[in-house]
Image (cartoon, coloured by chain):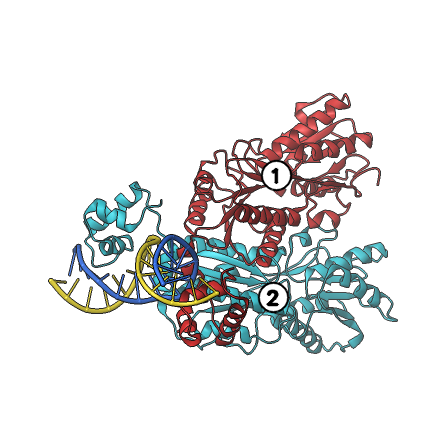
Chain colours: A red, B cyan, C yellow, D blue
Amino acid sequence: MSITIYDLAKKLNYSPSTISRALNNHKSIGKKTTLNIQKAAKEMGYKPNTQAASLRSKQSKTIGILISRINRPFVSTLISGIEDAARKSGYNVLISQSNDHYKDEITNANTLLQSRVSGLIVSLSMETKNTDHFKEFTDQGIPVVFVDRVPLSFNSYKVIIDNYNSAFQATQHLIEQGCKRIAHFAGSQHLNVYNQRRSGYLDALKHHNIPIDKELIINLKSLSFEEGKIATEKLLKLPLPPDGIFSANDTAALSAITYLKEQQIRIPEDIAIIGFNDDPIASIIEPSLSTVSHPAYKMGELSFQRILEHTTDRTIAGVSEIFVLDTSIIIRKSSKRY
Amino acid sequence: MSITIYDLAKKLNYSPSTISRALNNHKSIGKKTTLNIQKAAKEMGYKPNTQAASLRSKQSKTIGILISRINRPFVSTLISGIEDAARKSGYNVLISQSNDHYKDEITNANTLLQSRVSGLIVSLSMETKNTDHFKEFTDQGIPVVFVDRVPLSFNSYKVIIDNYNSAFQATQHLIEQGCKRIAHFAGSQHLNVYNQRRSGYLDALKHHNIPIDKELIINLKSLSFEEGKIATEKLLKLPLPPDGIFSANDTAALSAITYLKEQQIRIPEDIAIIGFNDDPIASIIEPSLSTVSHPAYKMGELSFQRILEHTTDRTIAGVSEIFVLDTSIIIRKSSKRY
DNA sequence: TTGTATGCGTTATCAT
DNA sequence: ATGATAACGCATACAA
């Protein structure tokens, strides 16, 4: 059916091993023979059987991605960055989504492990508190890169943004506009991203001597559009409603904008708003939403790069290497100083 | 290192072949022994080596996805549907993006072929006019499912929506509101989706005895936000500007809304608008955008199902089987009758 | 620099 | 119902 290195060997009067080595640009083979063999391979339409190569060499040239859900702007852009980078280096990309369920994350991790991926890129599910299911990877020397939603305690590569500082800046941005009562839509606190955004918010208030009012901190499980509306309703019913909102994601912030408009509350005059992520919608909604911009594509590229370097350099495992990428505050019409 | 069927064989005093058969629920093995073996396998932490199985059986339990770009709402939702369905059936999903380049599509198709995917799901790149690079798949009996952007001439499975009729309905929706001069943002005409949307638009006008004005048909290469703005500018400069716009996608329609608002033109009173896709932004922009809703997730599920059935039923190749899914017109505030 | 021989872990063919 | 053996296509240790 398909042509193998044995067919090439017969045709060119070489041994299969020479063919194999030439195809892999092995040093020991002469330049001319290497070129001849590669040329003949192309002519005869030789297609390497990657399964066989992987079985033998125990290296798959495939990297696994394990994320919550693909159809979210941040995640799909992240994957896009990974895929483009991987493709350039001749790697395949296997994806799987946990749909934010801890159990599915474990199942998928095991499947990816069985697929002998040469590296794993993970962004944790909303439910994940324990990350033991990734130990098998590092135990086998397979590099694991955590992106964005990362565990605190797991020793591995991590690609993140400075959530604390970004949140601090975002909150400060509201303060500089004159906001005195700033609410915060907070996400699940066991996840680094939401926990640190909350800390940044709190510290910005402290730093500017603004009293912290716990009624203004609304904990949301998934920061969904629906939850955003409920949270905003709750805030408006307060004796002293807020004059600013820092939301831990754009979805909930957009929901707030939509609801506040319905209630005839002026943005930013009555309530200024800033979100997090810079989803495409943020620049299109009216008024457009100030937010924190995440370098999602770049994070994807970098995550893959880290895996590639690990596998080529055979870096020592067990060391935590953390890459912190820059964010930027994007000021739009939901801010008073526009 | 990792435990194999040989280890199990020794431990349980069976031959490797019996172990293999039991693990695969082969009919010839007794119920009790099968159960015993499977139980022991789980206890000993046996993980099948899929590479080896694939090499031997020439079946990979992996399906390939080849799309333009992941980070678009329609595409990422499509992939999400594929992945969820595939995972449930124990299949892995390999993704690759063409970035809308013909050359990359060919390269990626070849890579996927080499990966011995057991099925391929494709949505063509914007540039693709020739689809010979998919013949190798069907020649080898690997099912190819084209989704959404499909070739006309290639004999294979196709999962699409009725673009013609959807466009007809959308245009008619504008006509029923009293629009007399309806513009159309048309996409690349060599792609079925945009070609048929244009036809539906034209026939709806004819059917209602509305004269066709070629100045109102704007051909856009990528239907991007930028192109949408330029197209809208052009329309406004016309001696007789339109009173309705049917855009072949939401992105360009959203751009039109944004620009028209800047120009103080009332939507829908002066110009009514309808888009295509029902991107998340459509319901959030002000005024919200009427549009045609695409069952992206379902299309993904169905595409995978078709591959699964093909591989189990060993259906005859060379037959074109086309699945046409329903769309629905979603009426929002960019329509006069809301 | 090139060739020989073996094994990666599994499934399939033939036999019992 | 179970076992022995070969083969899938490739890469590598060892030999030359």
Q: Where does the N terminus of chain A fall, quadrant-wise? A: bottom left
Asked if residue B74 shows in the view, the reply is yes
Q: Nearer the viewer, residue B7 or B301?
A: B7
Could you tell me which chain the residue with mark 1 belongs to? A
Percent x, y for residue A38?
52, 70
Query: Where residue B104 is drawn, which disc sits there?
Result: 2
Percent x, y for residue A306?
58, 46
Tell me: D5 left or right of A16: left
**Relative height, residue A214 to residue B131 (above, below):** above
Amino acid at pointer 1: Leu
**Relative height, residue B147 to residue A70 (above, below):** below
User: Dot 2, how many residues are within 10 Å of its Cα: few (below 14), some (14-19), or many (20+)?
Assistant: some
Q: Nearer the viewer, residue B257 or A64?
A: A64
Query: Where residue A9 is drawn, which disc sits there?
Result: none
Rendering quarter of residue C15: bottom left
Percent x, y for residue B272?
76, 62
Give the SS element for disc 2: helix
Residue at image location 62% in from the left, 75% down from the top: B129
Residue at image location 62% in from the left, 55% down from the top: B73
Q: Which residue is mark 1?
A: A223
